[in-house]
Image (tube, grey):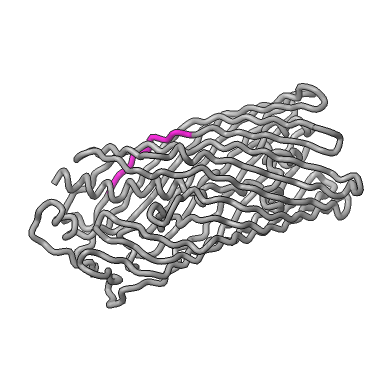
Amino acid sequence: MRHLRSTLLISAITLAPAAALGAGFGLISQSAITGGTANAGTAVTSSDPATVFLNPAGMTRNSGQALSITGHLIMPEFDFSGTAESLAGPVAERNSSSFSSSVDGGDSALAPGFYYMSQFREDWAIGLAVNAPFGSQTDYGDNWVGRYNAIKSEISAININPNIAHQINDRVSVGFGISAQYFSATLSNMVEGNALAAQQGAPVTPTYDGVNDIKTEIDGSSWAVGINAGLLVDITERTQMGLAWRSQVRHRINGDLTFEPQTMAANTGGSTTIELPETATLSLKHQPAFSSRLNLLLDAQFTRWSRVDTIAVDADEGQDTELALDFQNSWRGALGATWDQTERLQLRAGVAFEESAVKDTQSRTPRVPDNHRRWASLGAGYQFSNGLQLDASYTHIFISDTPIEADSDSGTALNGTFKSSADILSAQATYRF
């Protein structure tokens, strides 16, 4: 029984790292202003209060105080078509004779953000960012053929990030910060009771028809600390460069595992360590000599996903285990532009390409069926005379068709293709005083 509880725990908790550490789990959009340029120029958009998070060195290029509230409505589609196989034959949907599923696991979510910055001396500034750098929701329902791999996934991280910045001279500024990050996850899937009993030597035959399904759900959370730094340099009067770095954040996640029904094992718990990788961003902004109304923006971001190699799971009851994930590093590149239509109205546009951290179809998870992404964004902002500024942006993300061949601990293999995309609507209100 102790080994069976451990097997059930592993089937649930080891799915959390796969969901949490695909490139699609990171929430790149942290501002409606940079959202309008497909997040090109994130480390050089110093007038945006979100610079507190994106590059704290930019705070020194502002006078007075600024407060900003932003929200991003993320609307993904993960349309799966395919089947699941077992040694006993094809897997049927629960309460159905169908051996294939067509289901959309995308679940919309709102990602908020709060930013405040203040110049407290001529060459010093402080700021606070409270935002969600990670987050994802998927829900396929209890009945689809991939229920042994995933049903529902809710993953989020809330980042509390105070920063300080100093302008060294007329051209160079630096910034530093520390983050307290709260990470939480709720993950559920089915396990086939007879399949697990057979693994323990019981004389039973798995049916994979839903009759012997046990629903497992794990809830886990963690607090952890990270650091960040930024550099902003005026190369010429028309060209600016920004560098931003955020450290890895190491979470020790403790979770409670529940079973429904509790026919084969009692509720238990376990823990695992997840190390969210560091990022490094290079941004450039250039104002062409032929137009003072135009700014050209570039972004290149590196994420060290290769830190995520093996996840060790410590079970409260039963044996410990390890899971090899073997992620690869990824790059994101973006090009954008802003156009000052009037002194108060700015128009924005941008495109981007983002690599997936998932190496192949066998290591992909339906919790976040990640693949290469192409971004197209539009945005605008208007400054009122009373210090208020309103910004909005729209992004469509094209995701490459995503094949999957994912095994489960119930002895099934999910085979099919995801046709995925996402839309992001962002709005931001900023007040300067």
The residue at 37%/36% (across/down) is 273
Q: Measured from the top left, where is residue 39 in percent x and y?
A: 67, 48
Q: Is residue 318 left or right of residue 340?
A: left
Residue 408: quadrant of the picture: bottom left
Which quadrant is the C terminus positioned in?
top right
The one nearer the camera, 107 or 433, is 107
Magenta span includes 250: yes
Residue 178 screen position, x and y as percent: 56, 29
Relative to 309, say whether 206 is above or below.
Answer: below
- Does 357 sit above or below residue 377? above
Direction front: furthest residue:
360
Instruction: Check the image and name the residue furthest to the left.
Output: 203
Q: Give percent across and percent down for residue 272.
A: 34, 38
- Pick whichever, 237 or 66, lies toward us: 237
Decide if residue 425 is on the left or right side of residue 155. Answer: right
Region of the chain picked out in magenta, as a range: 249-257
Q: Is residue 135 left or right of residue 214?
A: right
Using the image, determine if residue 236 lies above or below residue 386: above
The x and y percentages for residue 89 are 23, 69
Residue at x 50%, y 64% (from the top left corner)? 401
The residue furthest bottom is 97
Q: Is residue 345 left or right of residue 151?
A: right
**What residue appears at the point 39 percent right and 57 percent down from the top-left corner?**
152
Q: In which quarter of the view is residue 59 placed?
A: top right
Q: Nearer the viewer, residue 359 or 215?
A: 359
Q: Residue furthest right?
A: 290
